[in-house]
Amino acid sequence: MGTGWKNTKYTGVRYREHPTRKHGIGRDRYFAIRYQKDGKRSEEGLGWASEGWTAEKAALQLAELKRAAQTGEGSQRLREKREIEARKRAAAREKKEREQKESLTFDAFFAGTYLPHAKSNKKYSSWKTEEGLYTNWLKPIIGHKPMVTISPLDLERTKKKLKDAGKSPRTIKYCLATVRVVFNLARKLGVYEGENPVSAVKLPQENNQRIRFLTFKEAEALFSRLKGKSVQTNNIALLSLHCGLRAGEIFNLTWGDVDLDGGRLSLRDTKSGRSRFAFLTSEAKEMLTSLYSDQKPHELVFSDRKGNRIREVSNVYARTVEELGLNDNIADKRQRVVFHTLRHTYASWLVENGTDLYTVSKLLGHSDISMTQRYSHLGDNTLYRAVQSLEKTIIAKHKVEDIARKLGKP
């Protein structure tokens, strides 16, 4: 590569020139130094003139190494010096990273990293709820604190503040769950190394299972009123009641998910994380058939006015429920009629009609049949009818035996 070594006016310093590369008006020069070490002649390369090296700078480096050899202090070889400097840089880098971790506040991480991540990976309603909980309840207490200083005691204070404000156990639990996922992401990204403080906090127990479902008369009145207000809202509600679908599952439906000939829907990316089929009643099938008009498989079955995915149920539904007085004088939220009541009604009607809980669980897409146990009491009528049937059989058998005795037959 070079054209041979050339000496400089400095003893022990020499260079070679690059065959083609220029630096200034001349060729680029590579400098090296030679010296005695433990009776042996050593030579070490320094670098190119284009990298800042000069004959004078090389001579100073050589003098420093010789001085270290005479005094026994410092690096006596350039390689040793470079290794020491590399270790110093690594230590400085580690110190800086540690200081950054120790000074990273919950607010800085939530706003700068977690929220953008949530917006990219979660449903709009989910990250929006977390953002609201953070702004209203978490930020005033732990937002300013470095994450490494946040303790279970801080979270207990948050729990108390929420409880004193009359917030439900579900809201408190959701708030703490938000803190947990923020810390989990920080640990995953390597900006937080401690234990998740939420793991040492007892989460409040909640019972948010809805126990209200519609009667046939209430459902008839609801849909009769909806038809005159919003055809799309009526159709969405109909699909929930007749197929047991969640609102989000309906909003995600594309025409590629609809099998009108087979009478079923393919549900992908559901709340449980599993795909499943939902089966159409004749009324639901008729409704979807009326909407279909050579749509493309990727097109949404229901969309907003701009053709985009619907984010939430129209308030037409809630207004209609209020107009019908379905929630009059009802304080318990579990007894109030909301859109999810339609899915709950679907399950309740199935159980009342004698469908076993395992089948209902599969139709609802529950990941655990224990989630379906809330409907178990509705099967009492079926059990009662079974006992009544047995009783009739026993009575009939007794009657036959009485007649036989009267006739003198064994």
Image (spheres, rainbow, N blue to C red):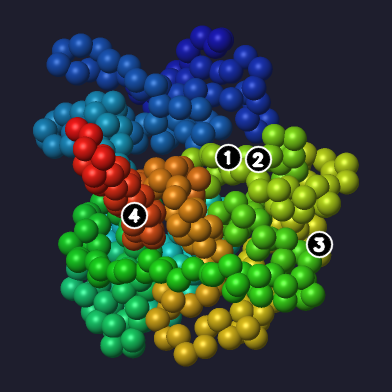
In whole angstroms, how far apart are the C-alphas of marks 2 and 1? 6 Å
- Does dot 4 land on a helix, a strand or a loop? helix
* Amino acid type of the residue that numbered disc 3 sits on in the rendered structure: Lys
Q: Is residue 384 above or below residue 137?
A: above
Looking at the rendered image, the quarter that the N terminus falls into is top right
The image shows residue 343 at horizontal and vertical percentages of: 53, 59
Decide which of tag 1 and tag 3 comes sooner along the chain. Answer: 1
- Does dot 1 land on a helix, a strand or a loop? strand
* Amino acid type of the residue that numbered disc 4 sits on in the rendered structure: Gln
Which residue is label 3 attached to?
Answer: 306
Residue 388 badge:
4
Looking at the rendered image, the quarter that the C terminus falls into is top left
Decide which of tag 4 and tag 1 comes sooner along the chain. Answer: 1
The image shows residue 6 at horizontal and vertical percentages of: 48, 15
- Does dot 2 land on a helix, a strand or a loop? strand
Which residue is label 2 attached to?
Answer: 264
Front residue of this view, candidates 296 and 264: 264
* Amino acid type of the residue that numbered disc 2 sits on in the rendered structure: Arg
- Residue lying furthest front: 407
In this rendering, the label closer to the viewer, 3 or 2: 2
Tell me if label 2 and label 1 are in contact, CB under 8 Å: yes
In this rendering, the label closer to the viewer, 4 or 1: 4
Decide which of tag 3 and tag 2 comes sooner along the chain. Answer: 2
In whole angstroms, how far apart are the C-alphas of marks 4 and 2? 36 Å
In whole angstroms, how far apart are the C-alphas of marks 3 and 2? 27 Å
Residue 277 badge:
1
- Residue lying furthest right: 293
Left or right? Give the position of 395 relative to 382. Answer: left
In this rendering, the label closer to the viewer, 4 or 2: 4
